[in-house]
Amino acid sequence: MRKLAVGLLLCCFTMQSHAKTEPLKGFYYASVQTPEGNEWESPGNLALNKEQPHAYFFSFQDKVSARKVLPENSAYWQSLNGDWKFNWVPNPEERPEDFYKTEFDVSGWDNIPVPSSWNIYGIQKDGTQKYGTPIYVNQPVIFQHKVAVDDWRGGVMRTPPADWTTFKARNEVGSYRREFTVPEDWDGKEVFIHFDGVDSFFYLWINGRYVGFSKNSRNTASFNITGYLVKGTNTVAAEVYRSSDGSFLEAQDMFRLPGIYRTVALTAVPRLHVRDLVATPDLDETYTDGELRIHADIRNLGKKAAKGYSMVYSLYANQLYSDENTPVAGVTASAPIAVVEAGEEQGTEVVMKVKNPDKWSAELPYRYTLVGELKDKKGRVVETVSTIVGFREVEIKDTPASEDEFGLAGRYYYVNGKTVKLKGVNRHESNPGVGHAITRKMMEDEIMLMKRANINHVRNSHYPDDPYWYYLCNKYGIYLEDEANIESHEYYYGQASLSHPVEWRDAHVARVLEMVHANINNPSIVIWSLGNEAGPGKNFVEAYDALKKVDTSRPVQYERNNDIVDMGSNQYPSISWVRGAVKGTYDIKYPFHISEYAHSMGNACGNLIDYWEAMESTNFFCGGAIWDWVDQSMYNYTQDGVRYFAYGGDFGDTPNDGQFVMNGIVFGDLEPKPQYYEVKKVYQHIGVKTIDAEKGVYEIFNKYYFKDLSGFAMKWACTRTGKKWRAVC
C-alpha cells in the first residue's frame, strides 16, 4: 500500500459496489428434466446449475460459533460423509440408468465410504480388484489419444490398444445413492449441497429430479437444491464418470483415481444472504499499520426487494497457532447495502483500518478472524458469517542497490517488506491406504513433518487442495503457491496444446477463477499459478487477465510462459545455470522461482546445498520447490495377503510410468527417507560458519526474517574418531 494516511486509524470507509460479478462462461442455468448424455464430452459445456464460485466461508447461528470458523461449528452445516450405496461398472452402457429414481431398489448394492477413491477402496486383501484398476501415468491421459492438432475432438471413448486397461474398462462409472433428512430449523432457508471433490465428472439428482452436472475434479461444486427437497427423507444420487473432456486438462503426474474423494455436505442460508465475502489485507509504507478491504455480495432469493440492510464487521485476534481469539478493541466497520431486488445481487465494500496488527508470515503466522453480520433496518441479525484473515503484503518491487543487502539493484519478491526465501516442496494429495481421499489427521501429520524439516513453502501441485489444508497452512505458517487444476501434458507445448483452441478458453479461465474465488482469503497463499505443463497459448493470457480482475494482491506464475505473468520460473535447472542466473544478468524474468527442482527419486538431493548456496547469495531468486514431498505409492497385496507399496504397473495397469511416481522425500506412509534429513539441514533457518576452528570461533547467522533467536538454545559437541570428546550445553 502506497498512500497517505487519512483520518484515524480505527475508522472505516464505506463504498457502494453495484457491479454484479461476471458469471463464468460455460456455466449454464436452466430447468432440465434429463441429461442429454453428452455433457461429459463437451469442452465448452462446463456446468449446469452449479453455483458461481465464491470464497470458502460459512453461515453460523451466532458470533460465538462464527469465531470458530470451521464448518462443523455451524448449525447450518451437515456432513453427508459416510456410507453411500454404490454400483460400479467398467463401461457407461452397463450403468443402471434409472438408479436415481426413488423407487429404484438399491438395497442389494454395496456400501462405499464417502469420501474415497473407488479403485483403492476396491483393492482386496489378495490383490484382486473389485472396483477397477488404479492407473499411474505421468504425462499421458489414460484413454486413446495422439499428439496432433484437434486430436481432442475424438473424445475419451476411442478404442485404445488391446493391452491398455481402458480397452475393456473404457470409462468406469460409479453410481452413488444415499438418504438424508434436513433439520427442521432449516425450514424457510435456502439449502445447498456441496461436493468438494469428484473425479472427474458427475450428474446430480435429488429425489429423482435432475439437478445438473459438474466437471473440474478439484474445486467445490455447489448446487441450490431447495426446490427439490421434501419433508422427511430425501434421496441424493450422483453418477460419476472416470473420464470426461475435463480429463484432457487433468493429466497430472499421479495415480488417476476416480470417485467422490472429498467431503459432501449440506448448508443452509437465509433467503437474503451473503453470497461472497472477500477480505483483502494491505499494509502501509513501513509495514506497520494495516487495513482490510472487505467486499460482500448480498443475494436476494426472496420474492420482495430488500431495503435498509447493512453489513457490520468485527475483528478478533487469534492466539498464535490457536483458534482461541479475543476481540480487537475499537476495530469495527459497517457498510450500508443498496436495495437488493428480488432475484438480484448487490455488492458493498468497506475498508477497516487496524493500528499495528500482528503480521502473518510463515515464521509467525498470526491470524485474525473477521466476523460479518447482515442486519436489517431494525438492527436484527439476519445472518452471521466469518473468515480467517492475515495482515501480510506480497509485492514485487524494483529495488535500488542502496536498499539491497547485497548491494545489487534488481526486481525482487517481498513478503511484508522482506526478501523472504521460499524453501519448498511440491505436494500431491496422496496416501497409500486411501488414494486421494486424505483425512484431516493425515494433513495434520504432513504439516508437522514439514515444519520439523524447516520447509516453509508448498506448491499445491497441480491443483487446488482440500479446504482443510489451507486452514492448516494459515494456522501453522506455510507459504503456498496455489495452482489451478490445469495440466494438458499429453499434448505437450506445440500447436496441439489445448492452450490454443478457442473451444478450451472458457475451461482454462473457469478453472483459474474457481481456484481464486474459493481461496482468495487465505493469507498463506502468496503466489497464484495458472497451471502446470499445459502449453503457452492465448487461453492462459485470457486466464491471467481474468484473474487480475479478481485479485491483484498476489503475483502470478506460470512456468510454460513467463512472458504473460509476473515472475519467472522453470523446472530442473542445472546448478551451473542457477549459479549464473542468480547474478541477475540473464535474459529471464526476475524475481525467479524454481517450480520444480532436486527430483527426489532414488538416492537424490545430495547436491541440494549447491542450489541454496547460489540462491542465498543474492535476492534475484526467491526460492524453489523440490519434486516432491511424498511418494505416491498405493497399498497392494500379494495373493497370500502380504501388503506392499505399489507403483505404476503393480496393479496390471497399462500403459504406466512405473516407479516415476516414487519421488518423495518421505515414503507414502509419511516415514521420512534419508532425503528428508538432508532437506532439513539445507533448509535450516540458522546458519553456522567456522571462523577459527583452532580458537573455537564460529559464526551463528539468523536466516529468519521476522523473528530473532531468543527462543533457541545452542548445544555443541566435539567428536574424535567417532567418539564424543567434549560437549558444552
Image (cartoon, rainbow, N blue to C red):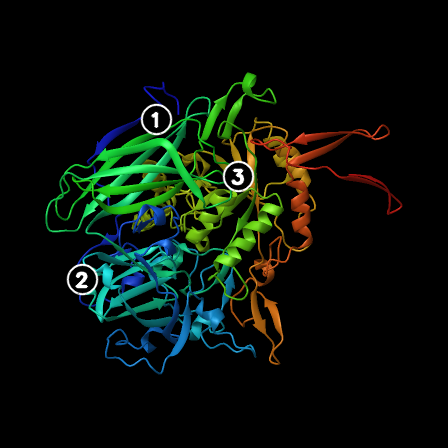
Rendered residue at 58%/48% (across/down)? 450
Q: Marks 2 and 1, Cα distance to the nearest angstrom?
A: 44 Å
User: Where's residue 186, x and y in %?
Assistant: 23, 59
Does residue 329 appear to the left or right of 35 in the view shown? right
| Circle 3 SS class | loop
Q: What residue type is labelled 3?
A: Ala
User: In which quadrant of the rendered view does residue 549 lie?
Assistant: top left
Q: Name the residue under label 2.
A: 227
Q: Marks 2 and 3, Cα distance to the nearest angstrom?
A: 45 Å
Looking at marks 2 and 3 on the same chain, the residue that comes earlier in the sequence is marked by 2
Rendered residue at 32%/19% (across/down)? 7
Looking at marks 2 and 1 on the same chain, the residue that comes earlier in the sequence is marked by 1
User: Where's residue 631, x and y in %?
Assistant: 58, 58
Q: Nearer the viewer, residue 358 or 650?
A: 358
Q: Is residue 183 above or below residue 419?
A: below
Q: Name the residue under label 3.
A: 362
| Circle 2 SS class | helix
Rendered residue at 33%/45% (across/down)? 63
User: Where's residue 321, x and y in %?
Assistant: 51, 44
Q: Name the residue under label 1.
A: 10
Residue 598 visible? The answer is no
Does residue 109 appear to the left or right of 230 in the view shown? right
Q: How many labels does the image show?
A: 3
Mark 2 against mark 1, which lies toward the viewer? 1
Q: What residue type is labelled 1?
A: Leu
| Circle 1 SS class | loop
Q: What residue type is labelled 2?
A: Gly
Rendered residue at 33%/42% (across/down)? 371
